[in-house]
């Protein structure tokens, strides 16, 4: 049986009161592709905007197996101990239909999943690029309006377009581990340049010495490739998600970085740039949606596909013809 649809006022009141059930339904609303839901979601976001923007937004990425979820569970626990209310947005790489392993992240975040001062929301990546969900920005705003002051965005993994998360967070943490072959070779230069803090995870037991050695190597590499125009040298930290060693030092480094960003004006300017990027991204989304829903274009596209299947046409020329048809109708 379908749940009764809330009014915008009911959503706003419930979210502002910190009602988890209403918050979850509000996020499901903004993730919906139904036209009626999209209209309601836009109204909801507009009403909640005055209560957003005060949380610190933290992106967390790293290669598969680096322990992102376990790290966030430990780091989030530290944030709670310091009096914060973290919300964690995890992105599942599986199909949006089957949900795949979407519950796995919550299982690895047992502390946060059950703590009254934290909130964990998994979302399917679907066709969205950049290691994030298509509605991650909107979800962050709803969580901020609900009173969460630290928003952690866990991305799918490291890839060429993974840096998309950088366009919506204030600080970007890149997790690394030793013993995974040539660790630095497997990481794209682009994401290395975007990262604000490098965190070598699983630095415990017999792996401690290797982690310290990797830290020294990475610091040397960063001197050569990392841009310095934002006014600081990126920090390299080691930590253990299992015993919490190094977590306090990492948090102190993060808070110091945020202080510097606000002091030199980069924090506010980054937020403005991100708003501009959100506008550009949504324009592109709406244009593509209209294009894909156009019946004349769809008919012409089917014909074009047949030509492509028989290798009779140039895909570039066909694309130009379809776009011209869309705008000249």
Image (tube, grey):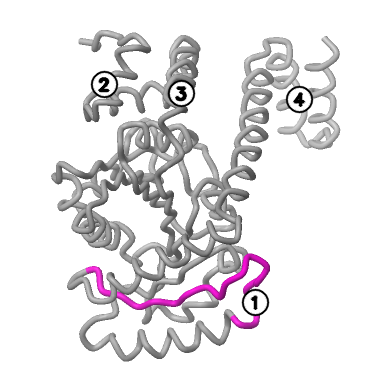
In this figure, which residue is indicated by the disc labeled 4?
Answer: 304
**Residue marked by disc 2:** 14
Residue at image mark 1: 225
Alpha carbons under labels 3 and 2: distance apart: 14 Å
**Which SS class for mark 3?**
helix
Q: Could you tell me residue 60's position as x and y percent?
A: 41, 57
Q: Is residue 294 magenta?
A: no
Name the mark on residue 274. Answer: none
Q: Residue furthest front?
A: 263
Q: Residues within 10 Å of mark 4 (few under 14, many from 20)?
A: some
Magenta: main secondary structure equals: loop
Tell which tag, 1 or 4, sits nearer the viewer: 1
Q: Quadrant of residue 122?
A: top left
Query: Disc 2, disc 4: CB below 8 Å?
Result: no
Range of residues picked out in magenta = 223-241
Q: Quadrant of residue 118?
A: top left
- Residue 228 lies in the magenta stretch: yes
Residue 270 drawn at (x, y percent): 60, 50
Which comes before the other along the chain, label 3 or label 2?
Answer: 2
Q: CA distance from mark 2 to mark 4?
A: 49 Å
Q: State yes or no: discs 1 and 4 in contact (Cβ < 8 Å).
A: no
Earlier residue among tags 2 and 4: 2
Q: Secondary structure at mark 1?
A: helix
The residue under the point 47% across, 15% down is 43
Q: CA distance from mark 3 to mark 4?
A: 39 Å
Looking at the rendered image, the disc whose residue lies closer to the viewer, 1 or 2, is 2
Residue of label 3: 45
């Amino acid at each position: 049986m379908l749940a009764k649809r809330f009014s915008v006022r009911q959503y706003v009141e419930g979210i502002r009161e910190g009602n988890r059930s209403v918050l979850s339904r509000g996020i499901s609303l903004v993730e919906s592709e139904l036209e009626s839901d999209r209209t309601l979601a836009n109204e909801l976001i507009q009403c909640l905007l005055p209560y957003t923007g005060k949380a610190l937004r933290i992106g967390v990425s790293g290669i598969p197996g680096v322990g992102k979820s376990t790290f966030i569970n430990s780091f989030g626990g530290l944030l709670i101990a310091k009096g914060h209310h973290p919300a964690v947005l995890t992105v599942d790489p599986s199909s949006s239909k089957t949900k795949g392993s979407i519950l796995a992240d919550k299982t690895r975040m047992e502390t946060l999943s059950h703590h009254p001062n934290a909130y964990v929301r998994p979302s399917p990546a679907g066709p969205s690029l950049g290691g994030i969900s298509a509605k991650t920005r909107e979800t962050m705003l709803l969580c901020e309006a609900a009173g969460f002051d630290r928003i952690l965005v866990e991305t799918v993994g490291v890839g060429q377009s993974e840096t998309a998360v950088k366009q919506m967070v204030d600080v970007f943490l890149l997790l690394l581990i030793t013993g995974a072959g040539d660790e630095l070779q497997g990481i794209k230069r682009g994401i290395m340049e975007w990262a604000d803090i490098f965190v070598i995870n699983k630095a415990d037991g017999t792996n401690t010495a290797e982690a310290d050695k990797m830290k020294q190597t990475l610091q040397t590499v960063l001197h050569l490739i990392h841009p310095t125009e934002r006014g600081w040298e990126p920090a390299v930290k080691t930590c253990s998600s299992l015993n919490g060693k190094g977590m306090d030092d990492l948090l102190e480094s993060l808070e110091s970085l945020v202080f510097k960003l606000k002091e030199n004006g980069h924090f506010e300017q980054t937020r403005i740039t991100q708003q501009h990027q959100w506008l550009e991204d949504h324009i592109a989304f709406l244009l593509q949606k209209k294009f894909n829903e156009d019946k004349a274009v769809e008919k012409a596209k089917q014909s074009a596909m047949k030509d492509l299947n028989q290798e009779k046409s140039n895909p570039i020329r066909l694309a130009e013809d379809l776009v011209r048809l869309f705008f000249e109708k």
